Amino acid sequence: MHLADSLLQFTVSGIALGAIYGIVGLGFTIIFNATGVINFAQGEFVMLGGLVAATLVSLHVPVALALPIAGFAVAIVGLLVQRLAVQPLTRSSVISMVTVTIGVSVLLRGVAKELWGPNSVAMAPFSGSQPLHLGTAAVEPQEVWVVATVLVIVVGVQLFFEHTMVGKAMRACAINRAAAQLAGISVDRMNLLAFGLSAGISGLAGVVLAPLTMVSYSSGTPIAVKGFCAAIVGGLGNSAGAVVGGILLGMLESLGAGFISSDYKNAFALLVLLLVLVLRPSGLLGKRTDRGL
């Protein structure tokens, strides 16, 4: 394979992978903007979405139904996490709240292991596995589903924040919580919705990702690390930055694995994160005072 063909192939594969990192980074951003907390259970929402959808499909539920059901189920889990674990510590320090999310991550992994067992669960691709061709690059149909689903989620989230009263209220809380509260906005309710929304979109990401990578109780943590890197690289608190950062990480990871070695692919995201923190601590699209949805 010529260098140009390899470059195109690895870039296309990296975009699909990076789209997932971006959507997980978007989940981090939504919760951070609403609550000021980094939710380290974000990857477990992705994992649960994949496991729930794989179970539904194995019970002959159509994918078209399994996808929204899994997203809704994970959104419910997010609401419960906020109400039962995070909300009681609202007045505690950020460190305490972050620690709680780490504990929730461990708890969700344990519950998933009990329910689905230690082995990975497979899920068939949505529309077969016959590769499509983009120039000289071969593209799996599931990768197209991943990119399309992420695009729909990103556009939907943007429309939600720009054109709905609830979305505008959440943006107001992200900009100034005290002022939003004085204006009659329930900050607690917006925090609750932020967890539900973030969990739901991460669950959807897990559904479209499951046919590509399989899914198990432990598959959420690596994705959470990459998603967190995406959010930091793009600029923590910037939704567009999270998506851009995720796609950039995915492309670099794919190119590095293809041209150097797949043994080091997980190190590329951390290397990029370190470079960005050193050269531009606010992230690629972030500003020092930027903290808005």
Image: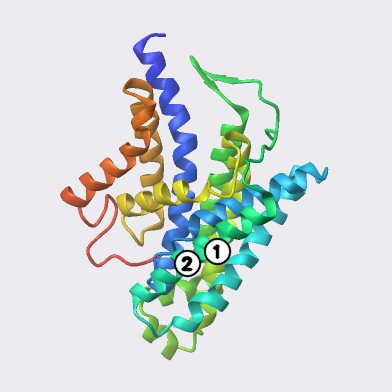
Can you identify the residue that label 1 sits on? Answer: 107
Element at label 2: helix
Q: Quadrant of the C terminus?
A: bottom left
Residue 12 horizontal/vertical position (percent): 46, 28
Can you identify the residue that label 2 sits on? Answer: 103
Q: Residue at x 78, y 42 (%)?
A: 58
Query: Residue lying farthest top?
Result: 1
Q: Residue flagged by tag 1: what amino acid is it?
A: Leu
Q: Residue flagged by tag 2: what amino acid is it?
A: Gly
Query: Residue lying farthest left?
Result: 279
Element at label 1: helix
Q: CA distance from mark 2 to mark 1?
A: 6 Å
Q: Residue at x 67, y 37 (%)?
A: 122
Residue 65 horizontal/vertical position (percent): 76, 49
Count neighbours of disc 2 (C-alpha within 10 A) and say few if under 14, some if 14 to 19, many if 20 or more: some
Q: Quadrant of the N terminus?
A: top left
Is residue 135 visible from the viewing direction of this image?
no
In this rendering, is residue 154 above or below 7? below
Horizontal side, residue 147 vs residue 120: left or right:
left
Q: Are marks 2 and 1 in contact (CB under 8 Å)?
A: yes
Q: Residue at x 59, y 71 (%)?
A: 79
Which corner quadrant of the image does residue 197 belong to?
bottom right
Which corner quadrant of the image does residue 177 belong to?
bottom left
